[in-house]
Amino acid sequence: MKRVFLLVLLTLGLSASDLTLEIVKEVGNEPKIAVENGTTGVESRLDKKFFKLIIGDLTVTSHFNVDDKERRVNFDDAIDQIAYRDKEYLLRYKLFYDDRGRLGARVFLFDLAQNRRIFEKSYTVSDRQRYPFIAHKIVYDINKVLNFPDVSFLRSFVIFSKYTGAKRADIVVSDYTLTYQKTIVSGGLNLFPKWASKEQRAFYYTDMSGEKPTLYRVDLYQGTRKKIISSPGMLVCSDVSEDGKQLLLTMAPGMQPDIYLYDLPSGRLERVTYYRGIDVNGNFTEGGRKIVFVSDRLGYPTIFAKEVDSRAVERLVYHGRNNSSCTTSGNYVVYSSRETNNAFGRNTFNLYLISTTSDYIRRLTANGVNIFPRFAPDGETLLFIKEYANQTGLGVLRLRYNKSYIYPLYTGKIQSIDW
């Protein structure tokens, strides 16, 4: 039986910006930061995980030189500045339970050079399972206080489809580290979740359990599910316009998949691509004037672009002979390319970054299976699926700093993602 669960989430205001192509190459210039843990009275397992999350978040921002040694202190003790004479900042926190049983954290950031606190705040969360978001919010806040580049991705919710058995897949909401996970839709084959807007209050997904694939919209705050459209053969929502009013759908009513533009206010469906082959994975680019998509027009899948109101198609990628998925941000495209052709072994898939307005190209990964890339709203952070052995995980790639991090999923297999 299909089940849609209500999940009350924090609204996250995320701003988009174009990708800065210049890679930060300075080594050792990040300010050095140490972390002190003043927690008492909280279960040991949670205490240890929270410290690792704080260290991990500081590291993944790429804005700090992080000392990962755990130092236990009394939260109200004076700062031992001699012990930190080679550091610029000290972050001290304390987990606690309030009189209502809610998990909370007190935190302050100490500027060791100026010998003063420059930030202090308390946090609480009613659902203890959501403790990772306290850590993410702490690091987001101190990063903002120090006027470093935006790291809103820390607070973003990731939504993904997870295979749980034969013809069964659930829709799950998590943090980017997969430490917090909550199943939102279960029962049947539920695939290709896509956030309805940057506010992450609702999402679309395809239910493949019935006679026809059906696209639904789920409102997380109201706990409601609404049918949008059904189509025989294939149905995927691959992108949503910036104003949330238009969807790019891959549909195959005549057995061959093409890309369609669906206008939500009017319910009008418009065909965008016309090809007797495979056109899939449409993504808006250049302010919605164009779309980027995957097509087999050359006899193998690669990346093309076209204006929404024109039939003229241009090839974007001249590298590789199997480029099967892509994502866009502003004038930039990241795509996954198969690098090997092993008939009986695992192939290598790497991610590449290109511009729709120049010949710029940059390889982002070096080895392994890296697929299904998704830009964060900041345009400088990338989420992707990493496959290894019999597992899948989430990869987070910080484009400006050329650094990537992998977070494994221990149960099930990720089918598709969005954030």
Image (spheres, rainbow, N blue to C red):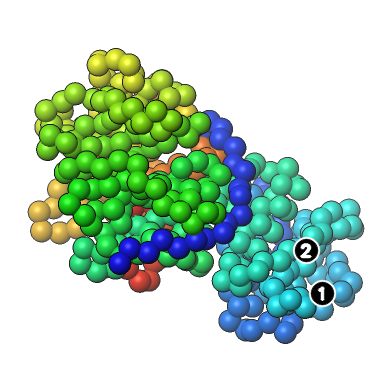
Q: Quadrant of residue 89?
A: bottom right
Report the residue marked by disc 2. Answer: 122
Q: Is residue 158 left or right of residue 296?
A: right
Q: Residue at x 87, y 74 (%)?
A: 76
Q: Quadrant of residue 277?
A: top left
Res 209 seen here: yes
Q: Secondary structure at mark 1?
A: loop
- Percent position of residue 272, x then y: 27, 24
Q: Residue at x 78, y 63 (%)?
A: 122
Mark 2 belongs to which amino acid?
Answer: Ser
Q: CA distance from mark 2 to mark 1?
A: 13 Å
Report the residue marked by disc 1. Answer: 75
**Where is the N terminus found, in terms of image quarters?**
bottom left
Mark 1 belongs to which amino acid?
Answer: Phe
Res 23 seen here: no
Frontmost residue, 327 versus 334: 327
- Percent position of residue 121, x then y: 79, 60
